[in-house]
Image (spheres, helix red, strand yellow):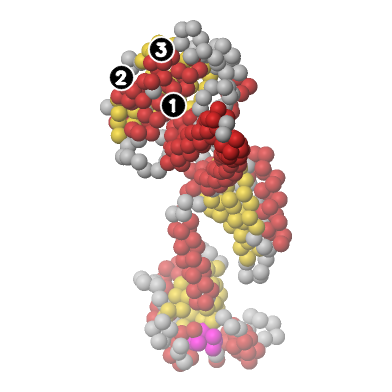
Amino acid sequence: MGDLANTVASGLPGAGEAGLRATLEYIKDGVFFIDAKGVVVDANAAACSQLGRARTEVIGAAVATFSGRAGFQWSSVVSRLESEPHLSYQTTHVHKSGTRVDIDLTLTRMPTQGSYLYVGIARDVTERARVEEELRQSEQRFRTLTSNLPDLVVRLDREQRYTYVNPVFVAVSGIPLESALGKTNRELGLLGDQLELWSAAIQRVFDSKAPTRLEDDFKRSDGSTITWDAQIVPERAESGEVDSVLIISRDVTERRLREEELHHKNDELTRFTYTVSHDLKSPLVTIQSFLGFLVEDAQRGDAERVARDVSFIKTAADRMAALLTDLLQLSRVGRKQSAPERVPLSELLNEALSMVAGRIAQEKPSIVLTSEPVSLYGDRLRLVEVFQNLIDNAVKFASTVPAPRIEIIAERVEGEIVIRVRDNGIGIDPRHQHKLFGLFEKLQPEIEGTGIGLALVKRIIDVHDGRIWIDSAGPGQGTTVSFTLPATKREES
């Protein structure tokens, strides 16, 4: 380092050229000494290694030779150092092989004999830059992925403040991205009564460093309920500590509803199996019993009792046949019978009335049909079954009054067609109205029928995305069965 080293060392008490050289060679960062014209006047071994050049190739060369920055001007650096004691920035050096070395560079101006000397300390951060770039790309891939997921994804730090939220969070919460970042759920007014539950679950993940799962219901602003299935996953820093958690929440509302529906259907199937076995067993017991009596009466030659036995057996067999026919109809609901079509209500009513013409002729009720020109969209055969059952029921239950009357009313209400079948018959106690759509439910055992008709009607209406209910002020006050069907664009055209 010659005269230069002595010049620099002269300002260091107790130091000489040998001590300075040893110190500079020990330093792992590159150290360059540059004159006012931008020429390297000395450099340590680390500096030469960063450039892949021998010391003789470095000393005497202009620093611009090694700079990887386009348009680099040493005069600009000198100008800045006139007003700033230190200058630090990231740059690149060009290795002799042509590769680029990422550098954190700090430049300092030192006064010397009548001039200035510039000391540059260059730290090779190529590996750090590579890792940072990989992290940047990884974070970019993460954000791209989570921005396009249908799931809600957020990241919280140890204070449970949001450091990242994806678009689903913004859409669901209604909170803009810039308003959410840096805030806690409490500050944002989120989670409501479940705030403590979720805060505790998140804290457990920080403490245990293990993921957990949480499923919870939330009220939407419109009052409906949404169910979130959330995975809370720890994110570890290089130290191994958990410095953030990732929460991935999926809207499982529809899945929950399907599970509940399946559970309901399983319960319904269990009740159905029990009820069918019970109601089929009764006529079977009758048939078995009277077959025994028939054998005994035939052996005695008692023709009158034989005829009675046969009559009981036939009645029980007919009831079993009726039950099986109705059950077969019920089992077919929902299966594809015919393509849905738009059918005028008047045609459906005429077909249904022709199918119950015998009972109408016998009971002679007054029947008033709607004049509303509406059409229904669905499976024509199933819709006829609906009206056949409802009209048949209405005639049966109105036959007990002196002047039976049946009204069929139709109207459009808020995108739906509402149909009402009203009779002035025996009525129904409000306490029992909820039972009538169950299988084999008969509130008047003395009136003929299997008790499947209304269950069949309800299932058909359900398949057509409608609703059905019963209104009656009580015994002797008549009954109205109402149901809805969607008013499709086809119907409204």
Circle nearer the N terminus (3, 2): 3
Q: Name the residue beneath numbered marker 3.
A: 364
In the image, what residue occupies the spot 60% across and 56% down?
A: 231
Q: CA distance from mark 3 to mark 2?
A: 26 Å
Residue at point 68% right, 63% down? 209
Residue 373 numbered tag: 2
76 left or right of 209? Answer: left
Dot 2: what SS? Answer: loop
The answer for how far apart the CA atoms under marks 2 and 1 are is 22 Å
Boundaries of the magenta span: 44-49
- Name which residue lies at 46% across and 88% down: 52
Q: Are marks 1 and 3 in contact (CB under 8 Å)?
A: no
Which is more foreground, mark 3 or mark 2? 3
**1 or 3: mark nearer the eye:** 3
- Say whether disc 2 or disc 1 marks the residue closer to the N-terminus: 2
Q: The disc labelled 2 sits on which kind of residue?
A: Pro
Residue 476 or residue 25, whichever sits in front: 476
Q: Is residue 73 visible?
A: yes
**Is residue 287 highlighted in magenta?**
no
SS for dot 1: helix
Q: Nearer the viewer, mark 2 or mark 1?
A: 1
x%, y% of residue 248?
56, 54
Disc 1 marks which amino acid? Asn
Question: On residue 389, which mark appears?
Answer: 1
